[in-house]
Amino acid sequence: MAYNSLTGNFPNSLLTALPSLDDLDLSYNMLSGHVVDNVSSEELGLRNLDLSGNKFEGPVPGFVFDLAHLSTLKLAGNKFSGRVDLGRFGKMQELYALDLSYNNLRVSVNANFTLQSKLNSILLASCKLQQIPDLKNQSKLLMLDLSDNKLSGEIPNWIWNLGDGYLRFLNLSHNKFSILEMPYTFPFLLDVLDLHDNYLEGDIPVPPRRVYHLDYSNNNFKSSIPVGFGNVLKSTLFFSIANSNVVGVIPESIRNASSLRDLNLSRNALTGPIPLIGNLKDLRSLDLSVNGLDGSIPDELTNLKQLLFLNVSYNHLSGRIPQFHDQTFTELSFEGNEGLCGPPLKKSCG
């Protein structure tokens, strides 16, 4: 019954009248109120319960912790509140996917925390976590989301070995991490690595070659992009390191990131010329604004036929703006460069 416009309270009768029900999916409706807890879990055979995207409130219903064969529990995007000890899920030997994200919950981890099950995904975004749960024994884990919590200090190097090194998705954004514990080796199958909005400093981590979404924005690296960085972005669709105190030049190797659709290097302290990236045929968005880039805008940029957004404003660029034939960019894309001239700027080249 997902993705409808159902309203009202949790339908308790579904559970009491259908004790052999395996799967209950009420996600993305407009249901509200408390989820009743006067249900005998001994009579229930629920394996999959999805209440995501509603307006349920109150505590997480106690009966879910006693469902012996529960495989999937998704409660994200509600108004559930109160404290939840993550250890309460520890005895669920068949638990495969857990999502408590974006509620009003305070998820805690005690010193003796263990999980007997081998989960595929653990999603705990915005759960007021203050420490990373010890997941070293999770040899099947492919997805981990701990974003928008209160985590700080080092990103432990054991996290890259989750899933026996086959981790595919990791989101640690919107925390207060400052450094990656050394030594570390990224999982070679990692598709998504999101570390934006932290306090990371020092060397910019070189990602695995497979990564297609890479977000390092809003950090404090104070270092330069490694020379060969573009060579490992050949499969990457999205890369941002905006507003991260990055210095030095944009490496020429960025032209080898041939799959890029979005490239955002804005609000840093980058210097030198704009590299020749006219071969990035799939590029839709390019933001190099608010840096210290100089020289002319390469005519090669007019080869980017898919480009929908361009911003090179507030640099030290000079010369005539190349004429883009099929795209219309306003003066906002080029303002703040005293040496630039020609349309769409009002300053003529004389």
Image (spheres, rainbow, N blue to C red):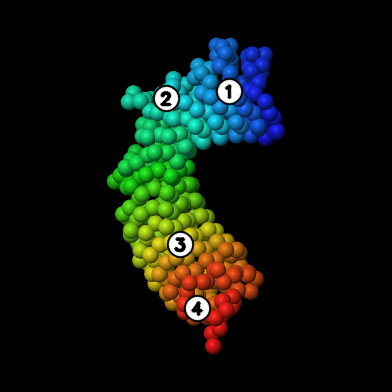
Disc 1 is placed on an element classified as strand
Q: Label 1 vs label 3: CA separation?
A: 45 Å
Residue type of the residue flagged with mark 1: His
Q: Is residue 170 visible?
A: no
Q: Residues within 10 Å of mark 4 (few under 14, many from 20)?
A: many
| Disc 3 + disc 2, Cβ < 8 Å | no
Disc 2 is placed on an element classified as strand
**What residue is shown with label 4?**
340
Q: Label 3 vs label 2: CA separation?
A: 41 Å
At x 36%, y 49%, the residue is 199
Where residue 44 sits in the image (x, y, percent)? Answer: 58, 15
Disc 3 is placed on an element classified as loop
Where residue 332 sits in the image (x, y, percent)? Answer: 55, 68
**What residue is shown with label 1?**
34
Q: Label 4 vs label 1: CA separation?
A: 61 Å
At x 53%, y 17%, the residue is 63
Whichever of callouts 4 and 1 sits on the residue coming sooner in the sequence is: 1
| Disc 1 + disc 2, Cβ < 8 Å | no
**What residue is shown with label 2?**
85
Where residue 120 sits in the image (x, y, percent)? Answer: 49, 33
Q: Nearer the viewer, residue 99 or 342?
A: 342
Whichever of callouts 1 and 2 sits on the residue coming sooner in the sequence is: 1
Residue type of the residue flagged with mark 2: Asp
Q: Residues within 10 Å of mark 2 (few under 14, many from 20)?
A: few
Name the mark on residue 266.
3
